[in-house]
Image (cartoon, coloured by chain):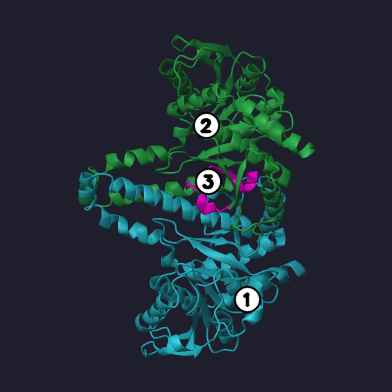
Chain colours: A cyan, B green
Amino acid sequence: MSEAVPGLPVAVDVMGGDKAPEEIAAGALQAAQETGVPVLLIGDPDYLKGLPKTPGVQSEGATEVIGMDEDPGRAVRLKRDSSLVRCAEAVRDGRASAMVSAGNTGAAMASALLRMGRLHGVSRPAIATIIPVPGAPTQTVLIDSGANVDCTAHMLVQFAQMGWALATERFGIAEPRVGLLSIGEEATKGNDIVKEAHELLATGAAGPQVKFIGNVEGRDVMTDHVDVVVTDGFTGNVVLKTLEGGVKAVVGGVLAALTSTEDVKEAARAVMPALMPLAAELDPDTYGGAVLLGVNGVCVIGHGSSSARAVVNAIKVAQHAVEEGLVARIEAVIGSARSVASN
Amino acid sequence: MSEAVPGLPVAVDVMGGDKAPEEIAAGALQAAQETGVPVLLIGDPDYLKGLPKTPGVQSEGATEVIGMDEDPGRAVRLKRDSSLVRCAEAVRDGRASAMVSAGNTGAAMASALLRMGRLHGVSRPAIATIIPVPGAPTQTVLIDSGANVDCTAHMLVQFAQMGWALATERFGIAEPRVGLLSIGEEATKGNDIVKEAHELLATGAAGPQVKFIGNVEGRDVMTDHVDVVVTDGFTGNVVLKTLEGGVKAVVGGVLAALTSTEDVKEAARAVMPALMPLAAELDPDTYGGAVLLGVNGVCVIGHGSSSARAVVNAIKVAQHAVEEGLVARIEAVIGSARSVASN
């Protein structure tokens, strides 16, 4: 990441997340100090006053907090002075370049959508999550990982476009491989919506840049066979959480085995350091958070349990997206397919 | 498992699977010798003639083979003398107690359904797969893991019943915890079909025995929080393959780390034996295969890459299901809910 970047700060929702405000503020201050990205802390004014003065760090008081379990629509409508809503307004009003929150995911989506607005031509914003691929140079973008439970084939085509744009921005690859999640490689496999989306993607509905490699299966998600996995928000959320649980179960099993007897425990000391890079690769905190795509601004949504390290990484992710023009990339790819369609 | 069980043999499709016929026949002979379960080998007559005479092993020649990639419906219709179709007929005609195949999954399902028939009251047979739970006393039943791509809420209720019956039979537990796969614990979370199924299950539509614990999420599948995870065949297949891929990626990452340098490799020798039980727990061959539920007979479908060890375990699984009356359990639970509904 670049250092001492000039320009607008990244707005950070200090009150959002299971470990808020302490870990969130600590991560934001660390990001400002270590990466030079300016940050705008938004949260409880008394809490913010107690933080050490740090170069590159501004603060704005917000008197309300949206809880992790509150109804998103209602909370965003009623809590106009919540830290989350105010973060989205800071982006809308040009006081921040991007927003980062580890709070209520639905409320973060609703705040971003209602305050920043939807990009022209996008039917539904979607959440893209980064899935680690152990040992591979880049990860996999999973889109939609939970924003839209019921989807049309047309929405899946747009997810393909937005996921493609994120992969070009994040991974710096010119031709990300875009796959459609199904239950077999053949075009005839899948439910009705997947079959229709396959037909659309195979005939270029996502535009000339988007390289569609066909259907992929669940077993491909955590491999280097595909860069962008397109699916509806129900299936995507199930996939994301299934992988979370599966990784946790296997890692837990390995740790239990390596501490099963005193002799093994002793021997395991020598191999533990070799396992640490894998542990870091599998830790969601490494990737900072999911990205809400299709809104008019950069919005990074961290895991509820985000640590300070996750917040640092989320700010880096947001800054990279701003510098590399993620929103403009999405507008361009959505626009190019629209102009093709209207020819 | 019991030894030297009298009674009908388990029919084994010797020609089905990537490693057929050698590994399949080897597994069947081993099962007959080691577990005392009689087997009926069905396959190429010349190949079967070359096998050693073994007590408890009978053979039947079948002149055709259904390939792994053939269209299931067409193959079963046209290849009437295929080993797969003949296995299902052996069960139908009372010459075998159950069938085992590691061949074309769709064709195995079609053979079983067309030859054995559907159980009274079952709308759609479904595939139940056993998901390992490292360190737990029992595994998780995932149903449907691929038979029915588009499902109604009523079908999901029957999957709950059939999965419940399998869990009571396989794990010997009186009150398996049955959960509905969704994207949040609240009854209001999920797509329309899941919400409707939740309502039905919560109001007892699966009958008085079936203990519905509410929605579960992807992260619960590989844990001891639930015994039966109910979902449609599209989502279930994605979950199954996602876990396959996730486990492979993590295990691969651990092995790569443990062989990353000569020093680590040397140190890892001492911890490898401690990891072997976990490797066995995670290996699908340990569980023998998936079970097709809702047909009038026991049908175990192995992974395409089944080894001899997988075949031994599949035969044990089939025999256990026969001895413990799996089919009768399904009939009873389907019938009990029907009679409740008609009261």
Tell me the quarter of the image containing the N terminus of chain B. Answer: top left
Q: Does the magenta stretch include residue B233?
A: yes
Q: Mark 1 points at which residue?
A: A75
**Disc number for residue B170:** 2
Chain letter for mark 1: A
Q: Where is residue B40 in the image (x, y as percent from the top left)?
A: 54, 15
Disc 3 crowd, CA 10 A, few/some/many (<14, 14-19, 20+): many
Q: Where is residue B104 in the image (x, y as percent from the top left)?
A: 59, 32
**Do pointers 1 and 2 mark residues of a single chain?**
no
Q: Mark 3 points at which residue?
A: B226
Residue B235 left/right relative to B25: right
- Asked whether the beta carbons under mark 2 and mark 3 sit within 8 Å of each other, the answer is no
Chain letter for mark 3: B
Residue at disc 1, secondary structure: helix
Q: Which residue is drawn at 47% across and 76% down?
A: A320
- Asked whether the beta carbons under mark 3 and mark 1 sit within 8 Å of each other, the answer is no
Spatial distance from mark 1 to mark 2, Cα to Cα? 47 Å
Q: What stretch is highlighted in magenta?
A: B216-236
Question: What amino acid does circle 3 point to?
Answer: Val
Disc 1 crowd, CA 10 A, few/some/many (<14, 14-19, 20+): many
First reached walking from the N terminus: tag 2 or tag 3: 2
